[in-house]
Image (cartoon, rainbow, N blue to C red):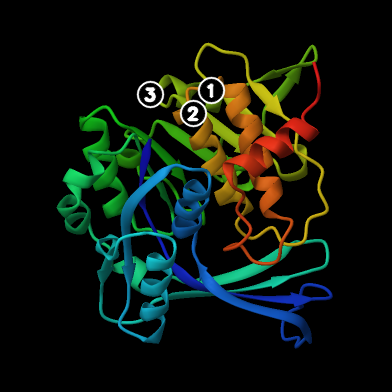
């Protein structure tokens, strides 16, 4: 099994603080961490830790951070051919993390914004060897659209996580098999939230229209309230969140997507794949920083066995 990631990569800096700062305020931090990150890289790394083969395309700049990214790719077993080099700065971001694991962050995407459709098309033979193509909105529209078009032409599934949020171009949505959004993004897309009728979850009319337009699977993540899966002509399924003592939620959404992909590629029932996704996201919050937090397949399976409701 292999996934091709249209990826973003940044040098991610995290600072532990007693509370999230107010505008104009300076706070003392209790810990600092700088590591490779970015939603695309996090997704790729989380997939690798789960035993999924990864290929992809990532853009770095011409600065001191590019060598850090290159050495990290070698460290985790990724070929340097996954990197394209552009003028300017490598992406970088800063996150503040409070004692409850909540965070606020800012990301300067730098060279990630210079990735082009032509770059992706040059990777077409490698993309075509994958079982799924995934992207987030830390990459520009053009390379995502090119990658998804290449994938769908070969009947390869695609997964989009439109975060950080911007409107989804119809040309991208039309090529998307699986859409993973959080509650804020779902509202921004006009999807609303699942409603209750006689105790059962019901998709909103907007969600039904989206599924009727060709989307195969919509996942709405709800933080501590879990996640809901919507499919055409199927009852929505709610997955409860796993209760853990969160230390840092950075990377949890990317881990959720990785767990979902791993389950689906293993041909697990959607309910089991969603349970694994929720567990993968929860496990990632147990450590400060994201790079060393993504669980292995064995750790994930043991956690689910210990914590999943018994039937």
Q: Nearer the viewer, residue 4 or 21?
A: 4
Residue 217, placed above or below residue 290: above
Quarter holding the C terminus is: top right
User: Label 2 vs label 3: CA separation?
Assistant: 18 Å
Residue under the point 83% across and 53% down: 245
| Discs 2/3, front | 2
Quarter holding the N terminus is: top left
Q: Residues within 10 Å of mark 2 (few under 14, many from 20)?
A: some
Q: Which residue is mark 3?
A: 214
| Discs 1/3, front | 1
Circle 1 sits in a helix, a strand or a loop, which is it? loop
Q: Residues within 10 Å of mark 3 (few under 14, many from 20)?
A: some
Q: Of the residues under marks 2 and 3, which one precedes in the sequence?
A: 3
Asked if one can make out residue 221 in the rendered structure from this viewpoint, the answer is: no
Please provide percent x and percent y for residue 299: 66, 44
Circle 3 sits in a helix, a strand or a loop, which is it? loop
Q: Which residue is mark 2?
A: 264
Q: Is residue 248 left or right of residue 114?
A: right
Q: Nearer the viewer, residue 263 or 183?
A: 263
Please provide percent x and percent y for residue 12: 54, 72
Q: Residues within 10 Å of mark 1 (few under 14, many from 20)?
A: some
Please provide percent x and percent y for residue 116: 23, 60
Q: Are marks 2 and 1 in contact (CB under 8 Å)?
A: yes
Q: Which residue is mark 1?
A: 268
In the current view of this chain or complex, which residue is farthest to the front? 298
Please provide percent x and percent y for residue 47: 48, 46
Asked if one can make out residue 285 in the rendered structure from this viewpoint, the answer is: yes
User: Label 2 vs label 1: CA separation?
Assistant: 6 Å
User: Label 1 vs label 3: CA separation?
Assistant: 22 Å
């Amino acid at each position: 099994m292999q996934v091709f990631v249209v990826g973003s990569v940044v040098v991610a800096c995290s600072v532990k603080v007693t509370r999230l700062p107010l505008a104009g305020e300076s706070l003392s931090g209790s810990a600092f961490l700088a590591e490779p990150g970015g939603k695309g890289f996090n997704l790729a790394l989380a997939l690798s830790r789960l035993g999924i083969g990864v290929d992809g395309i990532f853009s770095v700049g011409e600065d001191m951070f590019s060598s850090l990214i290159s050495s990290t790719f070698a460290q985790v077993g990724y070929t340097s051919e996954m990197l394209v080099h552009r003028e300017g700065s490598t992406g970088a971001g800063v996150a503040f993390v409070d004692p409850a694991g909540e965070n606020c962050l800012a990301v300067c995407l730098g060279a990630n914004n210079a990735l082009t459709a032509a770059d992706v098309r040059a990777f077409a033979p490698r993309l075509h060897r994958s079982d799924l193509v995934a992207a987030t909105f830390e990459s520009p529209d053009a390379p995502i659209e090119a990658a998804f078009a290449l994938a769908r032409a070969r009947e390869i599934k695609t997964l989009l996580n439109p975060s950080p949020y911007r409107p989804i171009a119809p040309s991208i949505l039309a090529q998307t098999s699986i859409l993973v959004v959080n509650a804020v993004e779902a509202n921004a897309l006009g999807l609303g939230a699942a409603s209750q009728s006689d105790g059962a979850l019901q998709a909103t009319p907007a969600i039904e229209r989206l599924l009727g337009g060709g989307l195969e699977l919509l996942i709405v993540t709800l933080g501590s309230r879990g996640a809901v899966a919507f499919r055409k002509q199927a009852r929505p399924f709610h997955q409860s969140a796993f209760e853990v003592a969160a230390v840092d939620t950075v990377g949890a959404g990317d881990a959720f997507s990785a767990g979902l992909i791993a389950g689906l590629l293993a041909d697990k029932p959607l309910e089991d794949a969603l349970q694994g996704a929720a567990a993968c996201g929860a496990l990632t919050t147990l450590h400060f920083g994201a790079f060393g937090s993504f669980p292995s397949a064995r750790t994930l399976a043991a956690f689910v066995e210990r914590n999943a409701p018994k039937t």
